[in-house]
Amino acid sequence: LENKAEDLLDLDPVPQTPVFDMGSETRTEGDAVTLTVTPVGLQERRGSNVSLTLDMCTPGCTEPYGYGAQLSPRDQSAQEYLRQGTHILTPAMLHIRAMDDQSLQAEFYETPMNFVDPKEYNYPGLVRKNRYKTILPNTHSRVILKSLGEDDFLTTYINANYLKGYGGEEGAYIATQGPTVNTVGDFWRMVWQERSPIIVMITNLEEKNEKCAEYWPEDTVTHEGIEITVISVTQEDDYSLRVFTLKCGGEERSLRQYWYTSWPDQKTPDKAPPLLELVQEVERAREEAPPSSGPTIVHCSAGIGRTGCFIATSILCKQLRTEGVVDILRTTCQLRLDRGGMIQTCEQYQFVHHVLSLYEKQLSHAAEE
């Protein structure tokens, strides 16, 4: 089970945040320790030299949304930080900031991760529904699958959260893990239930180990009463586009899947253009989708790292066009309130700054012409 936590490896062999792994944990200090992933194990490590980073990231932020949960003072302050965090950047500030690794690191590490305490999900059989056992959907915003008659928690569960879009637009996106062999049926139930017009997939099927099951057919397949048929496949430079027809209960819909494969080499800012192009392409497709359409579904492997970068970039491009400024910290905080760990590493946080800096240059260049 040498499962590496999500997409860190693509960016940097030593992840900059404590990301909870299947068995071991890599840290800034490089003091790799073996960690049995139990809430208690994490609590006990609070006194260590990485306690600051861990404190922000320790699962234990129970959601303060009507569960009557008593938040510890630290969890309370983490929630408040995420609700209030802001750093508005003008174009000039953005370009300088994108190059200032130290300031970005400081900002990234101060921002709480808001991971879920695994104790929130104490249901037998749930393990098979999660790709990484410590990356779980925050309870207040999780996607609930309508169960087929029986009131069974497992049939309603999928590791996915609704995320707000630009200007607080409700349910603009769904962030989810890459489907596993066990959850392909649940994934398609969600696509149909939510009327999603677009799936953005930002991972290869394998990178050192399995990152995502191949959940779509070569030509046609039926999952949970939903018939999925491939209509066309187009190969672009950095992604492929599949257009599907979905049929269920006499209704027929169209679905587009953008499969972006050029991420693993993304260690440098010069990889910003392909991501920016994908964001814009997905935005165009979104505008052309039927008005009854639901959220855009975005996934990588764990559904927090690259997924967070894509959704944040999407929101921030709109903010830049609309307001002429960006607030990358604010957007990160808002995403993490709804799904812990969004934008998972410091490199990813820097990368989002590079992408926005590039986008601003493109916009002002176009304006001059």
Image: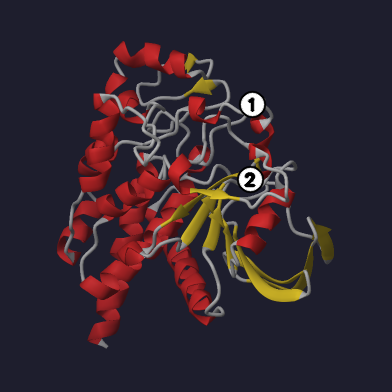
Image coordinates for residue 94, horizontal then vertical, percent: 21, 59
Q: Is residue 255 left or right of residue 50?
A: right
Instruction: Examine the rendered structure and indicate whether residue 109 appears above or below residue 147.
Output: above
Q: Amino acid at mark 1?
A: Glu
Residue receiving disc 2:
156
Quadrant the C terminus occupies: bottom left
Residue nearest the viewer, comparing 24 with 58: 58
Image coordinates for residue 69, horizontal then vertical, percent: 36, 30
Q: Is residue 48 visible?
A: no
Q: Is residue 208 left or right of residue 44?
A: right
Q: Residue at x 39, y 27 (%)?
A: 60
Residue 194: image quadrant is: bottom right
Residue 253: image quadrant is: bottom right
Neighbour tally class for label 1: few under 14, some 14-19, many 20 plus, Cα within 10 Å: few
Residue nearest the viewer, comparing 119 with 304: 119
Q: Is residue 189 left or right of residue 357?
A: right
Residue 254: image quadrant is: bottom right
Q: Residue at x 46, y 73 (%)?
A: 283
Question: Could you say which disc has been placed on residue 2 in the image?
Answer: 1
Q: Is residue 82 visible?
A: yes
Q: Amino acid at mark 2?
A: Thr
Mark 1 or mark 2: name the one nearer the start of the chain.
Answer: 1
Q: Residue at x 41, y 60 (%)?
A: 272
Distance (Cα) linking label 1 and label 2: 29 Å
Q: Tag 1, which secondary structure?
A: loop
